Image (cartoon, grey):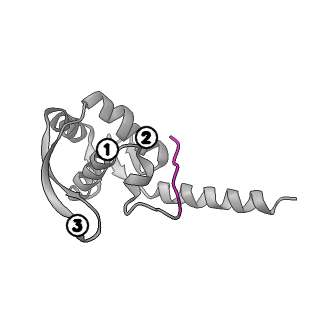
Amino acid sequence: MVVLFDMFHMPENVFDVVFATEQQALVAKMLISQMKSTEGMMGKTEMSVFATQLHDGVVVEVEKGEGMFKKKEKTKVSYNKRQFYDRILTPMKGMGMIDYDMYKKQYIISDKFNKAMYKIGLMWIQHIQRK
């Protein structure tokens, strides 16, 4: 996955930096919110139920607008189950936002993403200091 951002126009949340579309960012945010409500973990079955609910459509409150013009609107979010795994869950695992424990068969919120971003920053510093 490629992460492109403009440091002078940084979005308010990490999902807008990482994902290409608003819908992908919203679904990823919903996933992390759901995982937080279950102590930061979800089993394979719970993940499948979450993906199925998204596939069928879920009504959520979404903030629209910017600054003082922000308001919350209820909207129906529907996301294809296969695309959820391909475009949301797999990239989040690859970037270290989510881990999968094969023995417990559970998805876990991870801090490896932060460590990877730190490592990228160190690689940049090393690159510019080379002669």
Q: Which of the two discs, 2 and 1, sits closer to the camera?
A: 2
Rendered view: 40 above or below 19: below
Residue 102 visible in the picture: no
To which residue does mark 1 refer? 106
Quick one: SS at disc 2? helix
To which residue does mark 3 refer? 69
Q: Position of residue 1 (x, y in %)?
A: 50, 40
How many other residues sit within 10 Å of disc 3, few (<14), some (14-19) or many (≥20)?
Answer: few
Q: Nearer the viewer, residue 37 or 60?
A: 60
Q: Position of residue 71 (x, y in %)?
A: 17, 63
Residue drawn at 14 percent across, 50 percent down: 60
Residue drawn at 13 percent across, 55 percent down: 73
- Which is more N-terminal, label 3 or label 1? 3
Rendered view: 43 above or below 5: above
Q: Is residue 78 left or right of residue 95?
A: left
Q: Position of residue 48 (x, y in %)?
A: 22, 35
Q: In this picture, which residue range is highlighted in magenta?
A: 1-7
Q: Amino acid at mark 2?
A: Pro
**CA separation in Å, label 1 and label 3:** 40 Å
Q: Nearer the viewer, residue 9 or 91?
A: 9
To which residue does mark 2 refer? 91
| Residue furthest to the front | 69
Does residue 53 belong to the magenta stretch?
Answer: no
Query: Do the residues bearing badges 1 and 3 touch, measured as CB atoms within 8 Å?
Result: no
Q: Quadrant of residue 126?
A: bottom right
Q: Quadrant of residue 103?
A: top left
| Residue furthest to the bottom | 68
